[in-house]
Image (spheres, rainbow, N blue to C red):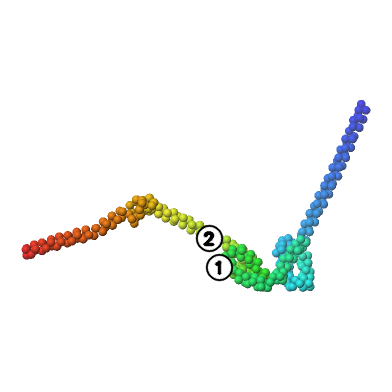
Amino acid sequence: MINIIQMLGQQRQPNFMEIMQTMAKTMAEQQELVKSLAEQQARVIAEQKEKVSTPQLIQKGGLAEFVKLAKPFHGDLKDPLKVENWIKEMEKTFRGQSVTEENKVPYAAYLLKEAFLMEYLPESDRHEMQQKFHTLVQGDKSVKEYEKEFNRLLKFAPLATQKDEESRRLKFLYGLNPHILSEVQKFEVCTYSTTVNKAKVIEQGQKVVMAVEESNVGTKKQKWMGALSGKDSTNHTNCIHARYPPNSCFKCGQQGHKAINCPQGRQNTQVTQRAPANQSVASERASTAGSSKGASVEKTCYTLC
């Protein structure tokens, strides 16, 4: 009996050791998992702190916000000192606004666009573009198309117009078509973007009203044409063209001749020509009879008297 218990104990002991080893392994894995989660949470907190401490100018406004704060290049591109000074200023702006490396080149190129045009665009072409901007009006363009052309030619406008928002707003405003300009002026707008947006909204509203009016006019015209066609179809039932088949005489309805050569027309003409002669004879007879009757009445009167 003792031998059997010893044998069972020897058999159970390895199983217990395996369980202990498994539990130890599981606890180690749990510790590693907890450590990993703690590290991950620490990284998230650090990233959030970094985002809070980093300026968000570029992330919020992008190129538009950058252009407001950066200075475009003015001067001769062939002057190395001016170019070097401008690059130094740009580097300061990049650092101040936390511009990424991939954005530095396109942002700087945007600011160099005006200088490039002034350097390599012929003077005659520049004057032509300036004149186009000076005389630019909306005309047959939509407000969106007018805005696009306005911004395209703005770089050739005087610097005062480019830099001063009120000058740009007034130039754009008074270039609008009168029916849009009069509506925009009813609102108190003080920025260029507000003026543009208000003009677009008014134009869209006027298009809707015009479409409704054209639809109503078309409906009335269809009703009028329908009534007119019904009336015409009723009247044409008694028309001479409806009584006779095609290519037939309009007088007798027979085919083979026209109304001008109609035999019945000739007979009617002969009868008409004879009628005056017969009427004249009848008139003479009536006149003679009347005169003779009058004479007899006169004789009777004399006799009685």
Q: Position of residue 221 (x, y in %)?
A: 46, 57
Distance from disc 1 to disc 2, alpha carbons, whole Å, reads: 16 Å
234 to the left or right of 294: right
- Res 226 seen here: yes
Q: Amino acid at mark 1?
A: Pro
Q: Which residue is mark 2?
A: 210
Mark 1 element type: helix
Q: In this rendered view, identify the residue nearer to me: 14 or 300.
A: 300
Q: In this rendered view, identify the residue nearer to me: 239 or 275.
A: 275
Q: Quadrant of the C terminus?
A: bottom left
238 to the left or right of 1: left
Q: Quadrant of the N terminus?
A: top right
Q: Residue at x 72, y 69 (%)?
A: 116
Q: In this rendered view, identify the residue nearer to me: 242 or 212.
A: 242
Extreme residue in the right direction: 3
Q: Position of residue 169 (x, y in %)?
A: 63, 69
Q: Amino acid at mark 2?
A: Met
Q: Which residue is mark 1?
A: 178
- Res 234 seen here: no
